[in-house]
Image (spheres, coloured by chain):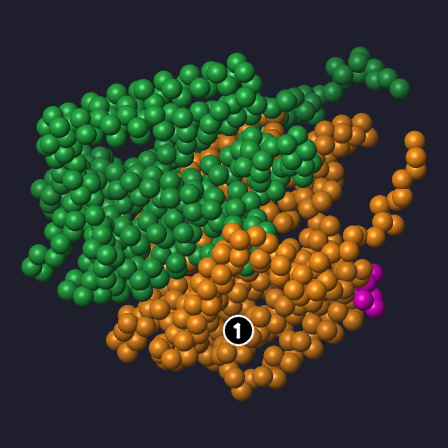
C-alpha cells in the first residue's frame, strides 16, 4: 500500500474560474445549446427587470401604500400606546443581544444574523414615526450593550437570560393587551390589533403554544400505551387531513356552540386556538421525526443507568431530538407566518385583511397591484429573512447535525 | 451484576409501571370522553335552543342560489346536496389539473435549478425563492384582482393568433370536438390503445429477459399514435372527419365556441400550479441531489450517455427520495384549493360557506366539508403508501 497524501494537502486544480472570461465560457457559453439558453434567459431577465422598474417608477401610484403605513403595520392600535410596542422592541433587542453574547461566543458572525431580527422589526416601527429615529438607535444600543454584558459575564447572566426568554411571550401578551380599563397601560381590545402586528402575534402564539402540545402528541404517538397512541394518531391525522381554513371557520362558527350558553370568546382568540390546534399536529410530526432519528442505543443506555421512563425522555431523548429538528421547526414557523394570512378570510384584520380593507376604500380603487406587491414584499422579507438566518445559524453552529 | 427476580413481587401495584400505565390510560380516556360529552352536549342543546337541531335533512331542500360554473346539471332549483356535489367536482377538477401541471412545471424548474448554466440556475432560484416566501392566499388574490380580472374587455380581447382569446370575462381557447366520424373513430382509438399497450408489454418483457430495457412506454405510445393516425383516415373515409377544431369567435357581445375558462378558475388554477411548482421544484432538486456523485461517475465510466445515466441510474434512485414529499405536496395542493373561496371559484368549501350563510347550518356543513377533505387525504395516503412500497422494492 502506498501512502496517500492527506486530502487537505492537495491543492485544488487550477480552474478557468479565475478569469471573468473563463468563468463566462464555463458557466454561460459552454456549448451551443447553453449559449442559446443564456441568451433566452438573459433576454427574459432584462425584459422582466425593465418592466418591473418601469412599473415601480412610472405607472404605479403608491398613495394607497404610503398613506396607510400605520394601518399596515399595526392596524388600529392607538397611536398613544405605541410606546408599548417600542418597549417590546427594546426588550427583544436586549434579549437577543444577551443571548448572542452568552451563547454564541465562538460564532460571532452569526450574531449579526440574529441582530437583523430586532433591526428589521425596528425598521417596521420607524415607519410609524419617522421623527422617532432615536428609538431606533436605542434598539441597536441595547442589543450591543446586551452583547457585551453577555460576553463579559456569561455565567452570571445566563440564568436571567433564560428567564427573560421564557418570560418574553407572556410579557408580550401583557404589554400589547394592557392592564386595566384606563390609565397607565390601558386595555387595548383585540379588535384594534391588526396589520403586521397581528400577523406576527398569531404566528408567534401559534408556534409557542403548539410546541408543548406537539411534543406531547409526538411522545403519545411513540408511546407503547395503546389508548394514548391511538388518540394521538387520530388527532394528528385528523388535523393534518383538513385545510386550515376549515379549522378557522370551525373556530369562528362552531366554537361558540361547544361552550355553555352565555360564554363568548374573543374572535382573535378563537382564530389563535384554531391555529394552535393546526400547528400542534404538524409540530408533532416534526418532533416525531427528531425522536426517530435518535439511535436505539440512547434509549438502552438510559435504561441501563436506571432512569425512569419520563427521566429518560426529559434528560436523554428530548434534548437530542429537539436539537435535531430545530431547522424543521424554523421552516414550520415560516409556514405558519404565511398561513396566518388565512385569518383575513374570517374577517380579522391581519396584514392581508387590512390590505383588503384599504382596497375597499373608494380613494384607492384599482390600486390592487401596488397594495398586493407591497404586502407580498413584507411577507417575503420576513419569511426569506428567517429562512436565511436559520440557514446561516445551522451551518455555523452545526445545529441539525448530530 | 444481576437483578434478583424475587424482589419483583414486593413492588406494590401503585408503583408498578405496568399498572400505572393502564391507570393513566384509563384516566386520560375517561377525561377525554367526559370532555367530549360535555362539548357535544353543549352543542346539541345550543342548536336545539336555536331551533335548528343537528340533522342533515336540510340537504334535500332546494338551494335557491346559482353557481358560476358546474360540470353537472345544476340550477337554483336543485338541492343542497347537488350544490355540494357541484362544489366537490369543481374541487376535484382544479386539484387534478393542478397536480398534473404543477408536477410538469415543478420538474422543469427543479431541473433548471440544477442547470450548469449560471443564468438559468439563478432564474430558477429566483422563481422558487420568491414564491416559497409569500403566502398563497396573497398570491391568489393578487392573480384574481390584478391579472385575470384586469384583462381587456371582450371587444378588445387579446388574441393569440386566433387560437386563444384573453378577456376579463374569461379565457377562450380552441378545442377539439367530436363530429360525424367520432362514433366509429372512438372504437378505433380503443383498439389503438390496446395494441399500444400490448406492444409496450411485449417490449417490457423482452427487456426483463435480455436485461437491456428498451424505452417500452415510448414504443407503446408510438404504436398507439401510428394506429390512431392511420385509423383517422379510415374513419374519415367511412363516416366523415371524427373531430373538428372549435375556434372561439366573437359573436355579438361575447365569444362563442371553443372552450371557455372563467377568470375565477384561471386564478385558482394558475395560482395553485405556480405556487406548488416552486415547492415541487425543491423536492425534485433535493431528490436528484440525494443520489451520490459516485453513481453518476460510475454510470459515465461504464459508458452510458448522459440521458441514459439520468433515466437508468439517477432517476430511479431519486424517485425513492422524491415520492414521500411529493405526496404531501399533492395533498397540500388539494387542501389549498379550499382557498378558492377568496377568488370566487365555487369549490366545495366556497359552496359550503354559501350554504352556511343561506341555511344557517354551520355545524353540519363544516362536518361534511372536513369529512370530504379527510377522505381525500386518507385515500391519497393509502395510494401513495402502496406506490411507495412498489418503488422501494427496487432496493438492493
**Against B138, is A185 above or below?**
below
Q: Give the range drawn in magenta.
A: A151-157
Q: Is residue A95 left or right of residue B203?
A: right
Side of A318 where A82 appears, left or right: left
- In the picture of the structure, the residue carrying the numbered disc 1 is A124
Quarter of the image for residue B363 reads top left
Residue A366: within the magenta? no
Query: Which chain identifier belongs to the orange chain?
Result: A
How far across and how far down the image is residue A368, in percent? Answer: 33, 69
Chief secondary structure of the magenta span? Answer: helix
Q: Nearer the viewer, residue B220 or A206?
A: B220
**Mark 1: few/some/many CA within 10 Å (<14, 14-19, 20+):** some
At a point 30% along the width and 76% down the height, the residue shown is: A364
The colour with which the image depicts chain B is green
Q: Residue at x 38, y 49 (%)?
A: B272
Residue B151: which quarter of the image? bottom left
For the N terminus of chain B, which image quadrant? top right
Front in this rendered view, residue A98 or B236: B236
Q: Residue at x 37, y 64 (%)?
A: A353
Question: Which chain does the residue under circle 1 lie in?
Answer: A
Going by the image, does A230 lie left or right of B164?
Answer: right
Q: What element carries label 1?
A: helix
Provide residue B136's location: percent of width, then percent of height: 41, 54
Q: Which residue is drawn at 80% across and 60% down?
A: A106
Amino acid at each position: 500500500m502506498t501512502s496517500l497524501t492527506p486530502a487537505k494537502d492537495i491543492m485544488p486544480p487550477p480552474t478557468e474560474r479565475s478569469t471573468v472570461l473563463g468563468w463566462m465560457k464555463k458557466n454561460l457559453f459552454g456549448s451551443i445549446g447553453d449559449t442559446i439558453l443564456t441568451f433566452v434567459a438573459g433576454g427574459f431577465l432584462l425584459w422582466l427587470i425593465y418592466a418591473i422598474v418601469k412599473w415601480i417608477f412610472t405607472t404605479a401610484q403608491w398613495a394607497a401604500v404610503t398613506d396607510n403605513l400605520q394601518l399596515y403595520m399595526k392596524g388600529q392600535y392607538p397611536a398613544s400606546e405605541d410606546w408599548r410596542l417600542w418597549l417590546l422592541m427594546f426588550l427583544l433587542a436586549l434579549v437577543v443581544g444577551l443571548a448572542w453574547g452568552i451563547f454564541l461566543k465562538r460564532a460571532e458572525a452569526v450574531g449579526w444574523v440574529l441582530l437583523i431580527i430586532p433591526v428589521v422589526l425596528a425598521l417596521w416601527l420607524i415607519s410609524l414615526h419617522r421623527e422617532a429615529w432615536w428609538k431606533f438607535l436605542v434598539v441597536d444600543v441595547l442589543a450591543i450593550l446586551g452583547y457585551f454584558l453577555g460576553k463579559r459575564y456569561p455565567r452570571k447572566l445566563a440564568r436571567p437570560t433564560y428567564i427573560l426568554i421564557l418570560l418574553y411571550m407572556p410579557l408580550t401578551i401583557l404589554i400589547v393587551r394592557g392592564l386595566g380599563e384606563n390609565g397607565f397601560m390601558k386595555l387595548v381590545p383585540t379588535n384594534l390589533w391588526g396589520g403586521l402586528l397581528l400577523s406576527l402575534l398569531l404566528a408567534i402564539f401559534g408556534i409557542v403554544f403548539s410546541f408543548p402540545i406537539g411534543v406531547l402528541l409526538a411522545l403519545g404517538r411513540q408511546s407503547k400505551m395503546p389508548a394514548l397512541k391511538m388518540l394521538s394518531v387520530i388527532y394528528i391525522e385528523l388535523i393534518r387531513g383538513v385545510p386550515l381554513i376549515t379549522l378557522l371557520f370551525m373556530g369562528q362558527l362552531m366554537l361558540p356552540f361547544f361552550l355553555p350558553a352565555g360564554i363568548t370568546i374573543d374572535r382573535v382568540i378563537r382564530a389563535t386556538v384554531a391555529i394552535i390546534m393546526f400547528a400542534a399536529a404538524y409540530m408533532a410530526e416534526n418532533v416525531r421525526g427528531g425522536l426517530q432519528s435518535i439511535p436505539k442505543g440512547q434509549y438502552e443506555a438510559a435504561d441501563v443507568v436506571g432512569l425512569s421512563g419520563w427521566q429518560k425522555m426529559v434528560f436523554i431523548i428530548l434534548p437530542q431530538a429537539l436539537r435535531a429538528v430545530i431547522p424543521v421547526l424554523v421552516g414550520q414557523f415560516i409556514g405558519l407566518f404565511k398561513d396566518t394570512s388565512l385569518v383575513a378570510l374570517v374577517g380579522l384584520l391581519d396584514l392581508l385583511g387590512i390590505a383588503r380593507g384599504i382596497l375597499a376604500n373608494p380613494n384607492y380603487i384599482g390600486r390592487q397591484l401596488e397594495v398586493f406587491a407591497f404586502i407580498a414584499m413584507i411577507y417575503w422579507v420576513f419569511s426569506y429573512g428567517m429562512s436565511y438566518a436559520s440557514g446561516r445559524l445551522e451551518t455555523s453552529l452545526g445545529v441539525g447535525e448530530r | 451484576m444481576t437483578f434478583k427476580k424475587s424482589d419483583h413481587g414486593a413492588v406494590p401495584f401503585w408503583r408498578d409501571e405496568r399498572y400505572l400505565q393502564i391507570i393513566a390510560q384509563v384516566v386520560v380516556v375517561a377525561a377525554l370522553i367526559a370532555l367530549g360529552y360535555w362539548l357535544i352536549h353543549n352543542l346539541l342543546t345550543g342548536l336545539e335552543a336555536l331551533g335548528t337541531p343537528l340533522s342533515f335533512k336540510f340537504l334535500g331542500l332546494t338551494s335557491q342560489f346559482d353557481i358560476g360554473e358546474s360540470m353537472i346539471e345544476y340550477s337554483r332549483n336543485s338541492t343542497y346536496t347537488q350544490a355540494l356535489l357541484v362544489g366537490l367536482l369543481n374541487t376535484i377538477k382544479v386539484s387534478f389539473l393542478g397536480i398534473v401541471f404543477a408536477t410538469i412545471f415543478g420538474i422543469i424548474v427543479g431541473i433548471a435549478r440544477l442547470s450548469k448554466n449560471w443564468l438559468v440556475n439563478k432564474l430558477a432560484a429566483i422563481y422558487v425563492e420568491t414564491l416559497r416566501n409569500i403566502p398563497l392566499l396573497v398570491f391568489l388574490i393578487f392573480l384574481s384582482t390584478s391579472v385575470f380580472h384586469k384583462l381587456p374587455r371582450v371587444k378588445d380581447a387579446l388574441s393569440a393568433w386566433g387560437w386563444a382569446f384573453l378577456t376579463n370575462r374569461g379565457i377562450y381557447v380552441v378545442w377539439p370536438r367530436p363530429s360525424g366520424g367520432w362514433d366509429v373513430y372512438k372504437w378505433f382509438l380503443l383498439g389503438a390503445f390496446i395494441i399500444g399497450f400490448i406492444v409496450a408489454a411485449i417490449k417490457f418483457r423482452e427487456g426483463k429477459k435480455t436485461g437491456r430495457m428498451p424505452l417500452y412506454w415510448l414504443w407503446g405510445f408510438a404504436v398507439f399514435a401510428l394506429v390512431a393516425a392511420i385509423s383517422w383516415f379510415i374513419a374519415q373515409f367511412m363516416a366523415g372527419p371524427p373531430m373538428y377544431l372549435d375556434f372561439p369567435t366573437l359573436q355579438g357581445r361575447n365569444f362563442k365556441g371553443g372552450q371557455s375558462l372563467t377568470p375565477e378558475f384561471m386564478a385558482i388554477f394558475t395560482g395553485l400550479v405556480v405556487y406548488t411548482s416552486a415547492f415541487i421544484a425543491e423536492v425534485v432538486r433535493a431528490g436528484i441531489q440525494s443520489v451520490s456523485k459516485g453513481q453518476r461517475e460510475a454510470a459515465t465510466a461504464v459508458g452510458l450517455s448522459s440521458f441514459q445515466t439520468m433515466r437508468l441510474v439517477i432517476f430511479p434512485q431519486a424517485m425513492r427520495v422524491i415520492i414521500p414529499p411529493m405526496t404531501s405536496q399533492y395533498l397540500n395542493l388539494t387542501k389549498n384549493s379550499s382557498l378558492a373561496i377568496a377568488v370566487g371559484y365555487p369549490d366545495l368549501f366556497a359552496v359550503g360557506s354559501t350554504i352556511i350563510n343561506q341555511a344557517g347550518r354551520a355545524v353540519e356543513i363544516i362536518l361534511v366539508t372536513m369529512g370530504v377533505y379527510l377522505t381525500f387525504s386518507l385515500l391519497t395516503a393509502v395510494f401513495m403508501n402502496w406506490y411507495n412500497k412498489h418503488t422501494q422494492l427496487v432496493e438492493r
